Image (cartoon, helix red, strand yellow):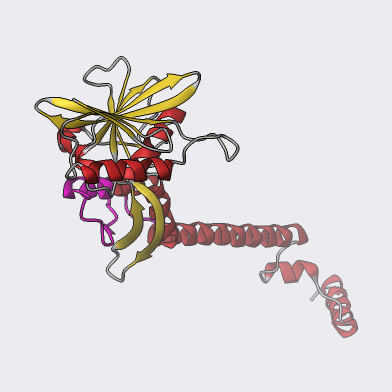
Amino acid sequence: MSKKAKDKGKDKDKRKAKGETDIENDQSEGSLPAGAAVGVKIAFALAAVVVVVVGMYMLRENVRSSSTKPAGESVRVRLVDPPEWLLSGIADKIIADIQSAIKDGGASDGYLAKDVSDAAAQNPWIAKVHKVTRQKDGTVLVQADFRCPFALVIFRPMGPGDVRVVDSDGVVLPLSLRMVNARDFVRILEITTDPPPAGEKWDSKPLADALKLLNLIKDKPYISLINPIEIKIINDRVHLTMYAPAGGGRRTKILFGRFPVDDLDYCVSPAGKIANLDNVVADNADVFDGIEQIDIQHDDAYTRRY
C-alpha cells in the first residue's frame, strides 16, 4: 500500500472517531442531496392535497346521488280526503301538476315535503296547504283546503269565451265550462274588468259585491231559482239586481240595491234586505210565480205582481 493510501485511511479513521461522516460515501449508499429531499416533500404534499380534493368530490357526488331523485322520476303524491265536489279529473290534474313541478325542480329527499308543499300552494285549485307528510313507502300526502266553483262571471264583450268560473272569494279557477253544468251556477253579469290568470283573485269591486250578495243567499231554499245577478253602476255606486223565474215564461226582478260603504252610510242592512226577501217568498209558497218585481232596498219590501 502506498504512503498516500495509508494517510487517507488514517484520516478516515480519525473522522469516524470524531463522529464525522463521509459525504461522498453516504451518497453512494442511497442518501439524497438536500435539494432533492425538499422536492420529495413537496411531491408528497401535493399528492395529499389531490387525495383530499378527490375524496371531497366523491363524497359530494355520493350525497348528491343519494339525496336527489333521478331525472324523470315522478314523486308519488296523494290528496288527503278531497271534498266530494272535487271531480276525479280535477284531483288527478292537481296531482299531476304537483308531480311535474317537483320533477322539473329535481327535489331532494331532505326537502321533498317542503318542495311538495310549495308546489301545492301554487296550484290554482288549492286555497291553503295545511300539512304535507312523507310515508315510509315514499308517498307524499297533501292535506289542504280546495277552492270550490261558486259562480260564473260573464264579462264584456260577452262572447262565448268571455266567461270565467270563480270561487266565493273571486279567485279564477282553471275550469272549462265543458266540465260543469252551467245551470248549477249563478251567473254574474256586466263585469267590465279583464280577468286575471287562473289562481289569482279578480280585482273588481262590483264582482266582490255580487259575490257578497250570493254568499248571503247561497243557503236559502230559493237559491236554485236566482239567476242571474246583474251589476249596474249608478252614481259611482254598485247596484245589484237579481232575477228569478215567475212562471209562464216571465221573470221576477229583485232590486237589492247597494251595500253600505261604512257604518255612517245610511242604508238598510244587507241582512235586513234578505230577511224581507225571505218573507215575500215564504208568503208566495216559496216561489216567485206571479211576482213582477220585489224592491227590498227599504225598511219594508215592496212587491208588484203581474
Residue lying farthest bottom?
17
Instruction: Name the one closer to the observer, 251 or 121.
Output: 251
**Residue at 44%, 57% in the rendered image:** 114
Vertical placement of 51 versus 192: above or below? below
- Range covered by the magenta-colored residues: 67-96
Looking at the rendering, which quadrant does residue 68 occupy?
bottom left
Question: Is residue 229 among the parts visible in the rendering?
Answer: yes
Give how far across and how far down residue 300 sits, in percent.
39, 38
Q: Position of residue 69 (x, y in %)?
A: 34, 55
On screen, 152 above or below 23? above
- Quadrant position of the C terminus in the picture: top left
Identified at 88% across, 75% down, the residue is: 7
Residue at position x 60%, y 62% in the image:
48
As for residue 79 lying within the magenta part, the answer is yes
Closer to us: 139 or 35: 139
Residue 215 image-quadrant placement: top left
Residue furthest to the left: 248
Q: Position of residue 261 (x, y in %)?
A: 54, 34
> Image point 86% across, 77% down: which residue?
20
Q: How many marks?
A: 0
- Magenta stretch: includes residue 226: no
Considering only vertical position in the picture, is 189 above or below 34? above
Image quadrant containing the N terminus: bottom right
Q: Is residue 100 above or below residue 117?
A: above
From where the camera sits, is residue 149 visible?
A: no
